[in-house]
Amino acid sequence: MADDPLEPPAQPQTEAAPAAASPSPSPSPSPVALLRPRREAFEHGLLPIPKLIFPEGTLAQTLAQVKEKLAAAAGEGGGRVPAAALAEALQIPHDQAALALATLAAVLPGEDPALEAPGGGGGGADIRDVLLFLYIQSYKRLVPRAHKDSPAVTDVWPSTSAFDGYLSALSPIQLVRSNSRRFMPSQADEEIHQLSYLQKHMANILTLLADSVEGEGDDSLVLTMETFEHLGFLVRFSEGTPLSQAATFFANSDPDMPAAPVPAAQVHDWISQNISSSLEFSTEKSTSKEVSQQASSDIDVTMADANATNARNSTPTGTNPAYFRNTTFVEGFSKTSVVKHASDVKGHSVKVLNCHESVIYILAPLKYVTVYGCSDATVVLGAIGKVVKVEHCERVHIIAATKRICIANCRECIFYLGVNHQPLIVGDNHKLQVAPFNTYYPQLGEHLAKVGVDPAVNKWDQPFVLGVVDPHDSLSHPAGVSDVQAESATRLDPDLFTNFLIPSWFGTEVQEPTKCCPFPLPEIYGVSQSKKLAALEDIRKTIRELQIDDNRKKELANALHAQFKDWLYASGNIRQLYCLQGD
């Protein structure tokens, strides 16, 4: 299924249309559809594999050579590149090539059954998608914004030099906080950065995709409509109009009579015009917002204040169609519980950001979930059809049924997983543990089927470990740090494994409710569970058989209730109980 439409239909800007007028200081929504970057490709499609990342100065030339090698293999496979061919072309191990194709599958705008087929890359990927995927590996994430008083910040925060040991001394949460939340790039900033990257590299990208024909100069490189549609991997219009329908040179083409190829230069002019219009509108919008928040941005906001102003079901509803229309945010919660069902989620993506000492339930079928900057929290994720990314978290329990998961820069976290692909572990991690999936809710089976997660396949204990340094991210690992393999995860002791109970009042009526965990429990964990249940039954039997009078039975019941209440308070679960009953 392709990415969901994000906006009501609007007339996209055509090649002949004039550029959008400069917005006023308080801009209203653009009268034309805006060309947006596909955030999924940049957020979930970058791999810290050095041989996938080429120097910018030789990027186009190197990928042109790679294209020749892949084209030879793809010619024999109907235009598709298998993992073996990618491994040979890039001189990387086969398992890394298979990982690259699996990652590509996770960020494609539509489903590719051949690529999803089992067997390390399945039937291979379309060569055009592979080339676009390899190209964006050169992307560098946006660095934190500079403080208006840089010397003052230098006095407060220690140096982040790669050579003074400061970074390695920081925990993931401290690292995020040391850059200060208000100096971190906003979602809008990141989209502008991504658009600027595409604007800079679009000419090279089109040249890489184009076919050579007889002709002179710019007319010697052309793009077919099919190839042009593959640019949907990188960009899309805000209302979901296919690129070929938005472009005048391909609009209303007859499927029985395909449109003639178009010169790459003409395509470049059209895309550049749309990117420039989007950047103009987005930059003006972002600047206007910064000006309006300048006074408040210099005041430290406590977590309590943040929660007081944060709606319980937090979803941005700004007027700018260029941002966030397919993402629901759960952000800034502390010492509380938050529940989101499918009806509460807008779009196909959820981001759980900076939540602490809380329990977050996301009981919905989704494509993407990001959990970032959380601590001492439990996050329950129902069914995720593409990928879950967990980053910069401490002492967090993640319970996830997903096709894929990536774990980066986390500490002392436990992951209870039902996952179809090997969990990817990258970055500076410490004391991670993995365990089998341990919960259910009535709609879980339905949600798993909807997003294509197979409960019969669970690779929870087969992590794929890459390096500590992420070349795309200068925040946690600046240039100059040598790379080593990331610390892997260990299996949770079966004696410490417990089932997680989701309150029954969360569920809604379904014809065939899920009544147990759909992922089979490994034998060693099943044996441990059986022992615990047997011990519990022995205690119950002993209590039932006690020869005591009614007064003593009442005293015993009161003592058990008091101990249970003490445990609720000591564990913090009493707070969750009150929060959920309040909902």
Image: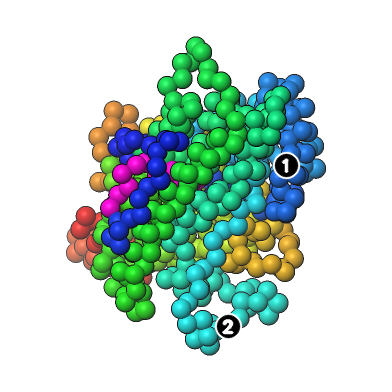
Mark 2 element type: loop
Distance between the Cα atoms at labels 2 and 1?
40 Å
> Which label belongs to residue 158?
2
Q: Indicate the position of residue 372 as horizontal and vertical percent values.
A: 47, 59
Identify the amino acid type marked 2: Pro
Asked if the residue at tag 1 contacts the one at tag 2, i.e. Cβ–Cβ closer than 8 Å, the answer is no
Residue pointed to by mark 1: 63
Label 1 neighbour load within 10 Å: few <14, some 14-19, many 20+: many
Q: Nearest the camera: 240 or 335?
A: 240
Residue 482's place in the image compared with 583, above or below, is below
Q: Indicate the position of residue 569 as horizontal and vertical percent values.
A: 32, 69
Q: What residue is rendered at 64% in x and 49% in y?
A: 137
**Quarter of the C terminus within the rendering:** bottom left
Q: Nearest the camera: 378 or 188?
A: 188
Upstream in sequence: badge 2 or badge 1: 1
Q: What residue is rendered at 58% in x and 74% in y?
A: 170
Horizontal placement of 122 versus 323: left or right? right
The stretch in magenta equals: 28-40
Q: Indicate the position of residue 490 as horizontal and vertical percent values.
A: 63, 56
Q: What residue is rendered at 60% in x and 30% in y?
A: 263
Q: Is residue 309 visible?
A: yes
Q: What residue is rendered at 54% in x and 71% in y?
A: 175
Q: Quadrant of residue 329?
A: bottom left
Q: How is the image coloured?
A: rainbow
Mark 1 element type: helix
Identify the amino acid type marked 1: Leu
